[in-house]
Amino acid sequence: MKRILLILWLPFFIPTFAQYKSESVGFQENKGQIVNQKGQLNDEVKYLLNSAGLNVQLRKNGFSYDVYQVQKTPFASLQASKTLPHPKDEQTRPQYILSYKFHRIDIDFENSNSKVELITGQSSEDFVNYYNISTKPEGVLAVHQYKEVTYRNIYPHIDVVFTVPNDPEKTVEYNFIVHPGGKISDIRLKFNGVVTALDNNKIQMNVCFGKMQETLPLSWTEDGAGKKKATVKYRKIKNNVYGFETSDAVSARTLIIDPVPIRLWGT
């Protein structure tokens, strides 16, 4: 029997009825297909990366983690049979009802450039078409994906680059690129929608389904002579606001800070 899943409620990030011509995984541009919980267009989200258990939204002056958990409940056969007037409809009866629970974490680039420019890498050749947007009966067509999105000059002489990792075990990667003239002290990350704490150079977050961490395993500097490891640590500025600090001499070199989000909840 062909299995058909009935989705009771899908979050605001993507409509359910789409025509796929896409095998790529990347940050999907928002051309009007992303809606909020009320079905209204959500133009605050510029790009969206979907992955198992965690979706990443890129906004103009920040980004968001949508932590989610899927619950699968068998469709009650007795109840379903009352709505199936023909035996052939048995093959189209849903096997399961899916429901979703969410915890959204917003991370804002505090005091950042309000005119920041978001620049994408090469577009995917494949695309997705969406046809179930009530305000767009003609559909939202040719929605492409990107492996990389850069916030150019989010702070003076500082960029943020979001990329899709090659490692399937990782959800997302992002680097702060502090060019010569940039000040590491300008970077301020404000966490909303979650209780945070700084412990052992990790930002700990308690989410509905367990815990999540922002770690800082690697930083380095670059110039014409090559790469050199740098020591960078998180610093707590105030409640739920964090930055970075280093004692290394980096002002004449480009400093790359490489935070890594880690999921500690069950899926």
Image: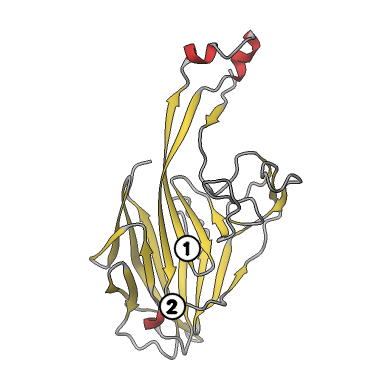
Q: Is residue 5 left or right of residue 209?
A: right
Q: Amino acid at mark 1?
A: Phe
Spatial CA distance of label 2 from label 1 is 14 Å
Viewer-proximal residue among 172 and 141: 141
What colour scheme does the image use? secondary structure
Task: Judge from the rendering whether residue 263 lies leftward or rightward of residue 32; answer left or right.
Answer: left
Q: Which residue is at a point 59% across and 59% down the rendered structure image? A: 43
Q: Residue at x 28, y 61 (%)?
A: 196
Q: Say few, some or many: other residues with alpha carbon within 10 Å of mark 1 (under 14 / 14 to 19 / 20 or more).
A: some
Name the spot of residue 239 as percent of width and height, x first.
27, 69
Q: In the rendered structure, which disc, 2 or 1, sits on the residue that comes first in sequence?
A: 1
> Can residue 165 be seen in this snapshot?
no
Residue toward you, 230 or 185: 185
Label disc, if present, on residue 111 of the rendered structure: 2
Describe the element under mark 2 as helix, strand or loop: loop
At horizontal 63% and vertical 66% (from top left) the residue drawn is 121
Where is 33 relative to 72, above or below? below
Residues at marks 2 and 1 touching, judged by CB atoms closer than 8 Å? no
Residue 151 numbered mark, or none: none
106, 217: nearer the viewer: 106
Query: Mark 1 = which residue?
Result: 63
Quadrant of the frame with the N terminus: top right
User: SS of the residue at dot 1?
Assistant: strand
Q: In the picture shown, does residue 101 fall above or below 211?
A: above
- Image position, residue 267 (x, y; %): 38, 41
State the residue lying farthest toward the right. 138
Location of residue 146 in the rendering, given as x and y in whole percent from the top left corner: 61, 60
Q: Name the residue located 33 percent from the left edge and 57 percent from the top edge.
A: 194
Q: Is residue 144 visible?
A: yes
Disc 2 residue type (three-letter): Asn
Q: Is residue 224 above or below residue 89?
A: below
> How far from the left and from the top, in percent, is residue 13?
54, 49
